[in-house]
Image: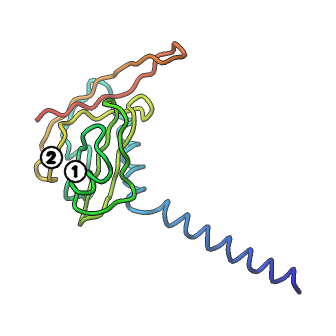
Amino acid sequence: MKNKNIFKISFFLLVLISTFVFIRWNSELNKNNRYLTEKLLNGASDASGTAGELFNFDYDKVYIFEPYQSKDEMEKQIGFKSRVLQETVNENMINILFVKDDAPVAYLYGYGSNNGYYIEMPTGNYSKAELEKTRYRVITNEVGNSFGTEKTYLNYIFEF
């Protein structure tokens, strides 16, 4: 009898945890992050286009944060608290938040060489309407590492 109860409780907890993990994995934020990452990684060198073509999902504003900006400063800038924000520790990192109705809907963060892409855009915040017609071009960058092997990544340069 005792083993049956332990099994039922364990099964219930497993279902509960699995449901929680699936909901978080399938959130709008994570879906948009996966979509954007896939799109940015599949870009072609020497390609060009508009931000509206590249960022074609629903958002109101984009925040491009300065290097070394604290999480508190970023939250003050966007006007609400967010668990997804992280501080950058280097000038060669991207830290871009897409927001819809005061909630994050996509977040791009990290080193270009680790992500496979880098977005070069002036710091600040931009509405979707401001950004949609902005043109970009893509170049391939190579960076060395301590192992002596070169890593390449796509650099999206936005021209305002």
* Mark 2 element type: helix
> Mark 2 is on which residue type?
Leu
Q: Is residue 160 left or right of residue 49?
A: left
Kindly identify the residue that appears in the image at 20 percent across and 43 percent down.
51
- Is residue 78 placed above or below 88 in the rendered structure? below
Rounded to the nearest angstrom, the CA distance separating label 1 from label 2 is 8 Å
Residue in the foreground of this view, choosing between 90 and 102: 90
Q: Are marks 1 and 2 in contact (CB under 8 Å)?
A: yes
Q: Which mark is residue 62?
A: 1
The image quadrant where one finds the N terminus is: bottom right
Residue in the foreground of this view, choosing between 81 and 48: 81
Q: Position of residue 81 (x, y in %)?
A: 31, 62
Kindly identify the residue that appears in the image at 73 percent across and 75 percent down.
11
Q: Position of residue 61 (x, y in %)?
A: 19, 55
Label 1 packing within 10 angstroms: few (<14), some (14-19), many (20+): many
Q: Quadrant of residue 88?
A: top left
Q: Which mark is residue 20?
A: none
Q: Position of residue 157 (x, y in %)?
A: 22, 30
Q: Position of residue 79 (x, y in %)?
A: 22, 61
Most distant residue in the top direction: 148
